[in-house]
Image: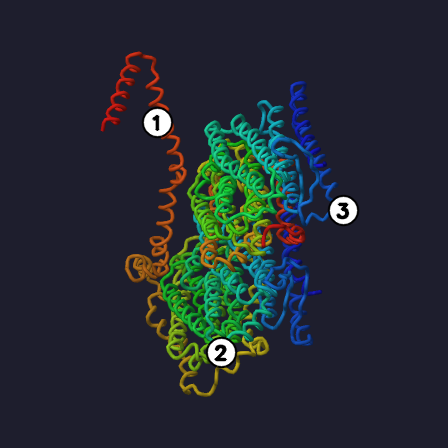
């Protein structure tokens, strides 16, 4: 009962705000939307607790039968039904918990926006869709949530709709993820065709019972589902939308494009783990997709000058870790990292938002500098976020990232090469984190405005709670053994060489040490360095290549967008129509000829008569 | 008898409206609205009190019309026609409300034509004698042409003539098929018959039935419309008055799909299965070509018109997949598209009334001044691009799931239409409501809100509880 209510709290709040947004004051709107999220959080925690005593560790809730598909001999019903197990419990706690804190922050942060009500309503709607996504007991309902979060993401990226750039970013995000969604939809059709069901539990059981490892159907279905996951989670090759999505307000970036929606792809793969296990090749692809995104996004993050874009690329690369974990079969570790990442990345984005706000919407790190002194509170929190991101021992990021790295070496679907990728990624992470911190927070101030210190308590409460979660999140490792029980035997510990752990732990420190010397100038007071560095990043071919997201945008523009637009332009008048309308031209032509011949002159008729006679006789003779 | 009464009643109230308008202006629309509501409600009352369950065709009226050729006046109903009739009544009311302020010239004659078109459409959905069917097919055409030609936009005569000729030429083929079928009946049974239920008992030789089927198929494919005979639609839609577009997209296209189900697939099952790969391929091309053409347009109504072609491609693909799921999908898509495209055309009309342009390049930033309108426009665009939770998704999902079981490769390509629809849907919504503010105007009036809320409520209810429709069995799938 409690479970079925969960998505309805934010839904009711959404409806109330959207219908009465003119009449509601700031306080009423905030109480409604944040209160709904608080209810969600409490309910989620109660449910998490109830799960321990539930039979089989599962709580289900059936709302109504949506529709039913005919699968030959019977009907497979597709229900509006929720399914809560340890995995979805982690997800709902992350979604409502982090969501609640971000709502709290947003209530203060967006207070002066003229469309505050609309903003909070969209945020609530997003939570509804996200909760449906993680609670769905069948893939069609999951798809509903999946599209729903996509739509909300579109609306929120384009929230300041009068700016051309935001509009384009919103459109890009929607269409690029739609490409992934289509792949997922085809995967669904195929799944139903071969197993006759779309219920996640049934599908998993049927697949395990009917298919051998390496089954061809399983291969294609998993590959298509992976397509959906890479679209939503901004992994290669569909990652291009995420950096542009930073056009949205900062709470949106924190909630949707860092903590929750972009991890939906990870959730999907983890949810369908029974199927993925049947197809080790695809597991291997998942690992490689994760690893390559991890490295490429890390490299791109090294040269960005917009603080939000640094964090966006960092998000991509951290999701790359999760994908890597899933591909290696380290399911629990992947989900654990999803959880800790939600905490510290939300913290980083929100603090960045607070800094941007204090500096009058300045997002360029080369124009910041010395923030540490001016905004010690925010800077302190940012440091906490960064050390979690770098995975320094003791922080939450450390536990989850180590859990992933530890399982890579001897995993049958990952291996040593991927282990080295993960280590290299960790090195890159600590280097770009240090660079960001040095440029933006150390050194001398490079902004002229007065710093506008926000005194809002709401803001500080939200940030502090997130900081605490980031620090201690490592001790809250979710117990997911039951969900992923099928696969736990694959990874045999103990075979790994002993130096692996040492290297993994030492890597971030190596990165910090390297940056300390390499980026020495950024800590200094010489202003020349920064103008040169900023100029350099756009002039130097390598760094400008990285700055533009490694050329993917340009590539897709040449390969896909330009030809599509070109063909569309070329055929704007509809060639089929033109062909059909040529009949009218033909008829018109004959009409003209006949009208011309009926001109009433006797001499013309006589000439035509004579000519006809000549032809007739000539034809007869020959 | 009820159907006949409704048809005659609609015609008479159309005539009455025309007459009253000459007495006092502003009467016609009121009479038309009342008539639409009255006959709509009486039809619903009739359905709810009727003891039949309409899973099979139920003959309501049957008497002789032209004795020499054994042509009879036969009216029959089943669930498919009931559902399409309900859709017709809903959209008729919407169409009248939309015309409320838009039509200022010759109002009486306008509403007469509107009601006459609907009377013809009702006849098409219920006729059980093929000659009668053909008769109604022509009856609905004439007032529709008049609607476009008299109250349309700048290029209305061209569009009306194009619409008329396309439909006429194709229905000629159907007429030939109908007459041949009647003669085949004479050969086999001994007397002429145009009755649909008599034809079902005929045994047709394969080579005959293939060509007879083609005659019907082409007529309905033009009406649907399917690639490559779709090109009347963008012109007719663009030039028609708003209510004309609503009726065209909402119901007239559905007569094509209805014909495909009732007369092509059921009458010629064998020939249809043989022809299915070609039809499915045409459906696929319609989906992709329509979506691509929609993207290329800068005219609001033209864009929606091409998107209709894309959606009807799903219907064609689903119908010729001969799969129970796909067939359900086709039926749902008919209703869903009827509602969502009607809504989008209505919005085109509302925008036109405010800025006197249909060009997307003249639009932008409407959200600022009309957030309610923007919210609904987004909802309807979302319905059009298959947002789960709204009716169109159920239709597309059923269609594609079913079609995949028979034509996997074609279905995979057709699924690309999902991307295409997102592209044109976003283009449509964003170029009008997002971006720098170019125009500002008053938000939706109460009448317009009523239209939007009604259509959206239907889409949402069907999207969340599709069993309301699917609980009825529709003949013709397998």
A247 versus B118 height, above or below? below
Q: Chain of mark 2?
A: A
Name the residue that disc number 1 marks. A589
> Camera-side residue: B319 or B432?
B319
Q: Secondary structure at mark 1?
A: helix
Q: Are marks 1 and 2 on the same chain?
A: yes
Q: Which mark is residue B141?
A: none
Q: CA distance from mark 3 to mark 2?
A: 68 Å
Q: CA distance from mark 1 to mark 3?
A: 61 Å
Residue B428 drawn at (x, y percent): 49, 43
Q: Which mark is residue B51?
A: 3
> Camera-side residue: A36 or B335?
B335
Q: Secondary structure at mark 2?
A: helix
Name the residue that disc number 2 marks. A403
Residue B452 drawn at (x, y percent): 61, 41
Is A130 on the left-hand or right-hand side of A567? right
């Amino acid at each position: 009962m409690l479970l079925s209510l969960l998505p309805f709290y934010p839904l009711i709040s959404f409806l109330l705000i959207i219908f009465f947004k003119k009449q509601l004051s700031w306080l009423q709107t905030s109480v409604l939307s944040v209160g709904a999220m608080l209810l969600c959080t409490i309910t989620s925690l109660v449910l998490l607790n109830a799960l321990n005593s539930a039979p089989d560790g599962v709580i289900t809730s059936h709302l109504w039968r949506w529709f039913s598909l005919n699968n030959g001999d019977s009907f497979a019903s597709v229900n509006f039904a929720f399914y809560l197990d340890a995995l979805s419990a982690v997800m709902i706690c992350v979604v409502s918990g982090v969501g609640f804190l971000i709502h709290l922050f947003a209530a203060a942060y967006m207070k002066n926006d003229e469309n505050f009500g609309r903003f909070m309503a969209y945020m609530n709607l997003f939570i509804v869709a996200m909760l449906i996504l993680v609670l769905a007991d069948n893939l069609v309902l999951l798809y509903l949530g999946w599209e729903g979060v996509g739509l909300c993401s579109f609306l929120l990226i384009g929230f300041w709709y009068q700016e051309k750039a935001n509009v384009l970013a919103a459109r890009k995000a929607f269409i690029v993820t739609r490409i992934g969604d289509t792949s997922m939809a085809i995967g669904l059709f195929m799944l139903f065709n071969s197993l006759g069901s779309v219920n996640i539990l049934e599908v998993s059981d049927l697949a395990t019972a009917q298919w051998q490892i390496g089954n061809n159907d399983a291969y294609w279905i998993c590959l298509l589902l992976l397509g959906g996951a890479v679209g939503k989670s901004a992994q290669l090759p569909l990652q291009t939308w995420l950096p542009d999505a930073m056009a949205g307000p900062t709470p949106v970036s924190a909630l949707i494009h860092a903590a929750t929606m972009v991890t939906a792809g990870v959730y999907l793969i983890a949810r369908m783990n029974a199927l993925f296990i049947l197809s080790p090749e695809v597991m291997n692809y998942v690992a490689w997709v994760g690893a390559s995104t991890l490295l490429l996004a890390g490299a791109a993050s090294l040269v960005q000058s917009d603080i939000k874009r640094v964090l966006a690329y960092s998000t991509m690369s951290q999701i790359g870790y999760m994908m890597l974990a899933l591909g290696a079969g380290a399911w629990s570790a992947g989900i654990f990292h999803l959880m800790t990442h939600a905490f510290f990345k939300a913290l980083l984005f929100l603090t960045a938002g607070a800094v941007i706000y204090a500096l009058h919407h300045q997002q360029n790190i080369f124009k910041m500098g010395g923030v540490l002194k001016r905004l010690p509170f925010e800077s302190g929190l940012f440091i906490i976020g960064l050390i979690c991101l770098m995975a320094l021992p003791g922080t939450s990021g450390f536990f989850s990232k180590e859990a992933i790295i530890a399982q890579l070496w001897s995993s049958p679907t990952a291996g040593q090469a991927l282990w080295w990728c993960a280590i290299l990624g960790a090195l890159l992470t600590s280097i770009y984190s240090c660079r960001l911190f040095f440029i933006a927070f150390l050194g001398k101030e490079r902004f002229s405005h007065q710093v506008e210190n926000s005194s809002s308590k709401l803001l500080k409460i939200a940030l502090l709670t997130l900081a605490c979660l980031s620090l201690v999140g490592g001790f809250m490792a979710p117990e997911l053994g039951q969900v992923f029980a099928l696969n736990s035997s694959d990874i045999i510990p103990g075979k790994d060489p002993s130096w692996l752990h040492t290297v993994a732990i030492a890597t971030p420190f190596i990165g910090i040490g390297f940056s300390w010397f390499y980026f020495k100038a950024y800590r200094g007071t010489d202003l020349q360095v920064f103008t040169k560095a900023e100029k350099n990043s756009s002039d130097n071919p390598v760094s400008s290549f990285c700055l533009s997201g490694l050329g993917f945008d340009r590539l897709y523009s040449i390969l896909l967008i330009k030809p599509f637009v070109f063909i569309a332009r070329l055929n704007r008048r509809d060639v089929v129509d033109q062909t059909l309308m040529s009949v009218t031209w033909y008829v018109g032509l004959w009409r003209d000829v006949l009208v011309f011949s009926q001109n009433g002159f006797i001499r013309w008729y006589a000439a035509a008569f004579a000519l006809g006679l000549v032809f007739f006789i000539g034809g007869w003779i020959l | 008898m009820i159907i006949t009464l409704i048809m005659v009643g609609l015609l008479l109230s159309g005539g009455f409206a025309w007459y009253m308008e000459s007495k006092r202006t502003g009467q016609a629309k009121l009479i038309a609205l009342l008539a639409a509501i009255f006959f709509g409600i009486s039809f619903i009352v009739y359905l709810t009190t009727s003891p039949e369950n309409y899973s099979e065709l139920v003959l309501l009226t049957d008497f002789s019309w032209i004795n020499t050729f054994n042509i009879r006046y036969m009216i029959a109903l089943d669930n498919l026609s009931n559902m399409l009739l309900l859709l017709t009544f809903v959209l008729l009311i919407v169409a009248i409300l939309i015309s409320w302020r838009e039509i200022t010239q010759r109002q009486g004659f306008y509403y007469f034509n509107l009601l006459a078109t609907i009377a013809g459409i009702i006849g098409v959905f219920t006729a059980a004698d093929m000659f009668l069917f053909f008769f109604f097919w022509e009856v609905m055409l004439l007032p529709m042409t008049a609607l476009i030609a008299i109250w349309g936009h700048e290029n209305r005569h061209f569009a009306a003539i194009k619409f008329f000729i396309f439909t006429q030429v194709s229905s000629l083929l159907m007429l030939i098929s109908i007459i041949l079928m009647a003669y085949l009946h004479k050969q086999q049974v001994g007397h002429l018959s145009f009755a649909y239920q008599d034809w079902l008992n005929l045994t047709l030789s394969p080579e005959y039935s293939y060509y007879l089927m083609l005659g019907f198929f082409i007529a309905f494919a033009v009406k649907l419309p399917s690639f490559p005979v779709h090109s009347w639609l963008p012109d007719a839609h663009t030039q028609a008055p708003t209510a004309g577009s609503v009726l065209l997209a909402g119901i007239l296209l559905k007569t094509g799909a209805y014909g495909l189900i009732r007369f092509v697939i059921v009458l010629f099952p064998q020939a249809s299965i043989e022809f299915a790969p070609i039809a499915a391929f045409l459906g696929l091309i319609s989906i992709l070509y329509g979506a691509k053409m929609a993207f290329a347009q800068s005219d609001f109504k033209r864009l929606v018109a091409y998107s209709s072609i894309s959606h009807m491609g799903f219907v064609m693909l689903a119908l010729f997949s001969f799969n129970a799921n796909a067939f359900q999908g086709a039926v749902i898509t008919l209703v869903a598209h009827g509602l969502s495209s009607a809504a989008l055309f209505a919005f085109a009309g509302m925008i036109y009334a405010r800025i006197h342009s249909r060009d997307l390049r003249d639009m932008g930033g409407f959200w600022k001044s009309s957030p309610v309108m923007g919210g609904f426009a987004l909802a309807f665009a979302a319905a059009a691009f298959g947002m789960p939770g709204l009716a169109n998704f159920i239709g597309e999902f059923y269609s594609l799931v079913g079609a995949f079981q028979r034509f996997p490769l074609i279905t995979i390509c057709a699924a690309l239409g999902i991307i295409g629809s997102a592209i044109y849907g976003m283009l449509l919504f964003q170029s009008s409501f997002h971006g720098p503010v170019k125009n500002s105007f008053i938000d939706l009036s109460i009448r317009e809100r009523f239209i939007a809320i009604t259509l959206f409520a239907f889409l949402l209810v069907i999207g969340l509880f599709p069993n309301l429709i699917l609980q009825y069995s529709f003949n013709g799938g397998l």
